[in-house]
Image (cartoon, rainbow, N blue to C red):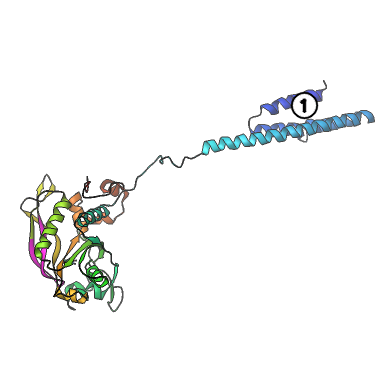
């Protein structure tokens, strides 16, 4: 066997065993490079006789063709297996949970809104909504608020125009009027939502949450209001008995008006709701003022009813032992992780609200 044949055989074996594109590249240079096997063999032709030259040249060309084919095949299989290997290594199973898996939590305010909605829906209330950007008319005038009422003060209300005609609603009560103007009595609704006042300390934030309640029908009286709120407070705090008192108060949109306090005591630095000799105010309420009914196109001679407004954040703080209202709105993931709720545990009355 000639040296050429021998070298060609060796390189073929090497090529066969090559496992990476880099190895193949080295063998390619050894065969087809400037000083590779083929070129070295061609260089030798000069010293041969014309007949031998022709014969050997055609042998080298055949060898070149054979090797080129072997090379192309090898490159193809190697590239395919390298791609397969890479795909195997980089394959992500998108159905698997992430390694650093963080489940989102439901904010205590959303949780409490869901809990309250569930409690009231159980006794026939439906949920209404109103806009955050409200007109001065719905926020104050339609609710029987006199022109010079302190609540209209520039210092408390965020007005959105110079003429003080548009504002960020200061309470959810305008939803009462909007609901009544939109339908026919009877009405039995709650309206949770964001409200705004120019205030900020440990128990006040410029944006906070309220929940409005309205029940208008024939022959509704204060007794119904008391029964309804008593049921609500017991369900919400998940207690069998609750100490509650109605304190006379004043709101322009209700007559008579009351504020509701619940009894509590402090045990081991924790608030125990429902008993004890301390009182905590939790909501405002009353019988809807005839002027509000008139402004809402409801005949006060035929229909009457009660309304109430609950501070949602306050209730969330009480129920879940949160001390600083401002922490509700700081968007601290660690805080939410601690105080938040499982998104799959939707609160319902029959399954339990918070447990
Ligand atoms: N809107 C009142 C407030 O923000 C709360 C309120 C009191 C609502 C009495 C009512 C009500 O519906 O009847 O302070």
- Along the line of sight, which residue is nearer the eye, 185 or 41? 185
Instruction: Note whether residue 49 is visible.
Output: no
Q: Position of residue 332 (x, y in %)?
A: 31, 51
Kindly state the secondary structure of the residue where label 1 is placed.
Answer: helix
Considering the whole magenta stretch, tell me its main secondary structure: strand
x and y percentages locating residue 130 in the rendered image = 28, 67
Q: Is residue 206 magenta?
A: no
Residue 107 lies, with reference to residue 157, above or below; the image says above
Viewer-side residue, 137 vs 347: 347
**Which image quadrant shows ligand 1?**
bottom left
Residue 257 drawn above or below residue 98: below
Q: Is residue 169 left or right of residue 38?
A: left
| Quadrant in which the C terminus is drawn | top left
Verify whether residue 248 appears in magenta.
yes
- Look at the numbered disc 1 and say if its residue's Cβ is closer than 8 Å to ligand 1: no
Residue at image mark 1: 8
Q: Quadrant of residue 183?
A: bottom left
Q: Magenta stretch?
A: 246-262
The image quadrant where one finds the N terminus is top right
Residue occupying the far top of the picture: 1
Pick the front one: 354 or 313: 354
Q: Where does residue 65 sit, x and y in percent of width and height?
A: 79, 34
Residue at the (18%, 61%) spot, across then down: 310
Residue 221 spot, x, y in % from top left: 10, 66
Q: 59 and 246: which one is in front?
A: 246
């Amino acid at each position: 066997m000639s040296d050429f044949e021998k070298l060609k055989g060796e390189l073929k074996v090497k090529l066969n065993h090559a496992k990476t594109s880099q190895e193949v590249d080295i063998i390619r240079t050894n065969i087809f490079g400037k000083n590779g096997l083929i070129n070295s063999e061609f260089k030798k032709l000069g010293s041969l006789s014309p007949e031998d030259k022709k014969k050997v040249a055609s042998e080298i060309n055949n060898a070149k063709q054979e090797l080129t084919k072997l090379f192309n095949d090898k490159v193809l299989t190697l590239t395919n297996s390298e791609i397969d290997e890479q795909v195997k290594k980089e394959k992500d199973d998108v159905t698997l949970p992430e390694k650093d898996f963080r489940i989102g939590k439901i904010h205590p305010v959303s949780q409490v809104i869901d809990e309250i909605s569930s409690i009231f829906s159980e006794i026939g209330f439906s949920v209404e909504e109103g806009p955050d950007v409200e007109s001065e008319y719905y926020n104050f005038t339609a609710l029987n608020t006199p022109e010079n009422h302190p609540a209209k003060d520039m210092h408390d209300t965020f007005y959105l125009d110079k003429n003080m005609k548009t504002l960020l609603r200061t309470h959810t009560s305008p939803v009462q009027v909007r609901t009544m103007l939109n339908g026919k009595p009877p009405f039995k609704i709650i309206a949770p939502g964001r409200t705004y006042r120019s205030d900020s300390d440990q128990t006040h934030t410029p944006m906070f949450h309220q929940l409005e309640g309205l029940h208008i029908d024939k022959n509704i009286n204060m007794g119904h209001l008391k029964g309804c709120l008593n049921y609500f407070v017991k369900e919400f705090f998940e207690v069998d008995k609750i100490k509650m008192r109605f304190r006379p108060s004043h709101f322009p949109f209700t007559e008579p008006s009351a504020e509701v306090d619940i009894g509590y005591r402090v045990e081991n630095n924790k608030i125990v709701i429902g008993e004890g000799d301390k009182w905590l105010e939790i909501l405002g309420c009353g019988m809807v003022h005839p002027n509000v009914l008139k402004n809402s196109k409801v005949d006060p001679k035929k229909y009457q009813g009660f309304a109430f407004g609950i501070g949602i954040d306050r209730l969330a703080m009480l129920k879940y032992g949160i001390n600083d209202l401002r922490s509700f709105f700081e968007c601290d993931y660690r805080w939410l992780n601690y105080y938040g709720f499982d998104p799959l545990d939707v609160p319902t009355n029959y399954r339990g609200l918070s447990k």
